[in-house]
Image (tube, helix red, strand yellow):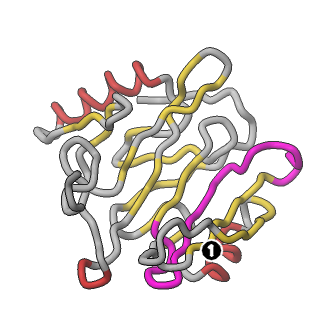
């Protein structure tokens, strides 16, 4: 399952559930994320809007590739004061190529990725799931596949998340990629 991006200098990272992505480890502080991401490029830290008082204050760390000043962030990391780093998003074009158990996840055509995810699940006698947007993803906690329009093609832009502990209001991802512990309508 080889994937050629056509973009020179694309880093290769791996994902380990509940551990982290590339040099980023879940639970890191903002300062630790900035230091670890420094190898990829320059960082910009900002506050995320708090729409509800129950959410812990959260910071967004955008990592831009060196030599690409006007490009979108290659990686965006979200860091909560209560739980530390809990989400990493990789840009489909500028982000590192991130693999999980040999499956390349970033910048892929969604139909091509769907075929590979199904083959991955069949080879391992495991499940896969679809997100509410219709993106196929391994049924492993922590991967939420999104689509990013690149030209006229939707490319994969995964989010890698780790839920905070239940004692701090944690959540779980269900088979269809939505929170299952949240109150219903």
Q: Name the residue: 62% across, 72% down.
A: 59
Residue at the outermost front position: 185
At a point 29% along the width and 79% down the height, the residue shown is 165
- Residue 153 occupies quadrant: top right
Report which quarter residue 9 is drawn in.
Answer: top right
- Quick one: 63 or 118, which is closer to the camera? 63
Q: Secondary structure at mark 1?
A: helix
In the rendering, at what x and y percent does residue 125 appear? 11, 38
In the displayed structure, would residue 22 be above or below residue 65? below
- Asked if the magenta segment contains residue 123, the reply would be no
- Provide the residue span drawn in magenta: 66-86
Left or right: where does residue 42 sit relative to residue 80? right
The foreground one among 67 and 12 is 67
Counting every numbered tag in the picture gives 1
**Image location of residue 2, percent across then percent down:** 47, 29
Q: Position of residue 32 (x, y in %)?
A: 62, 81
The residue lying at 71 percent from left, 33 percent from top is 7
Residue 113 image point, x, y percent = 40, 27
Residue for badge 1: 33
């Amino acid at each position: 399952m080889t994937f050629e991006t056509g973009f020179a200098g694309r880093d290769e990272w791996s994902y380990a559930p509940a551990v982290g992505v590339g040099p980023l480890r879940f639970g890191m502080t903002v300062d630790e994320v900035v230091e670890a991401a420094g190898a990829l490029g320059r960082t910009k830290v900002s506050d995320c809007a708090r729409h509800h008082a129950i959410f812990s204050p959260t910071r967004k760390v955008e990592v831009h590739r060196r030599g690409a000043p006007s490009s979108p962030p290659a990686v965006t990391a979200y860091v909560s004061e209560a739980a530390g780093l809990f989400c990493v998003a990789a840009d489909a074009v500028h982000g590192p190529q991130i693999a999980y158990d040999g499956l390349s996840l970033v910048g892929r055509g969604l139909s091509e990725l769907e075929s590979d995810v199904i083959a991955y699940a069949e080879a391992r006698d495991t499940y896969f799931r679809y997100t509410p947007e219709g993106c196929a993803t391994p049924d492993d906690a922590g991967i939420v596949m999104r689509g990013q329009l690149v030209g006229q093609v939707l490319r994969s832009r995964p989010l890698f998340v780790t839920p905070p502990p239940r004692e701090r209001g944690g959540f779980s991802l269900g088979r269809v990629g939505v929170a299952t512990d949240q109150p219903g309508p």
